[in-house]
Amino acid sequence: MSGKKMNPTRIEWADNTWNLIPRFPGYYVTKEGKVLSTACNEPRIMKQIAKKTGYRYLFLYDGHGRSVKKYVHHLILVTFVGDAPGGMECRHLDGNPSNNRLENLAWGTKQENSDDKGRHGTFPTGERSGTHKLTEANVREIRRTYGAIPLREMASKYGVSHTAIRRAAMGMKWACVKDVA
């Protein structure tokens, strides 16, 4: 590495300070979320893979030669803050899963993470939910015709249970749909 003596836990390279990732010898990370591999002769910044959701991950080799998928936000917290306390998970404080800067990350409870999603408007409700069968237009139509058409008939029309129809009509589900057009 250009003649510099390397500190085993921290190196200076390419105008950045890189800290060794625990349990992954030869891999370093910055507070800004870059990951460096020193496995080859020359250090190289690793290319991260972005999921559709925005979360970034990569594959690292552990000390036993096994390739392991690791999320960048998790690597940063483990390296700079320490292992997650029991029952804790990583939170992106600004709601942006691509922002893996240390100051944007924190360990928190599942509830805190869920509350963050509500504050940021990123909680998957309504049509953004991966499990929805109804659309907002369907819910508005159900609310308009609720009581005039039997529940089981509406359920058959929309391909859901009569309970799902009742819950949508009464606002127990699909509360995100506010106005009936």
Image: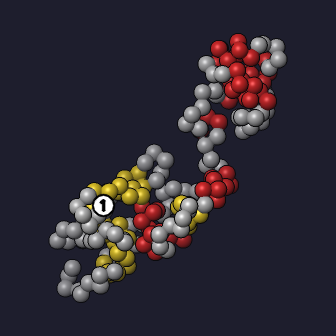
Q: Is residue 84 above or below residue 180?
A: below
Residue carrying label 1: 60
Q: Amino acid at mark 1?
A: Leu
Q: Quadrant of the C terminus?
A: top right
Of 169 and 83, nearer the camera is 83
Which quarter of the figure has residue 159?
top right
Dot 1 alpha-carbon crowd within 10 angstroms: few under 14, some 14 to 19, many 20 or more: some
Q: Quadrant of the N terminus?
A: bottom left
Q: Position of residue 17 (x, y in %)?
A: 38, 79
Which quarter of the figure has residue 137?
top right
Q: Residue at x 50, y 67 (%)?
A: 84
Q: Position of residue 164 (x, y in %)?
A: 69, 26
The answer to whether residue 68 is left or right of residue 1 is: right
Number of marks in picture: 1
Q: Residue at x 63, y 22 (%)?
A: 160
Q: Is residue 4 above or below residue 161?
A: below
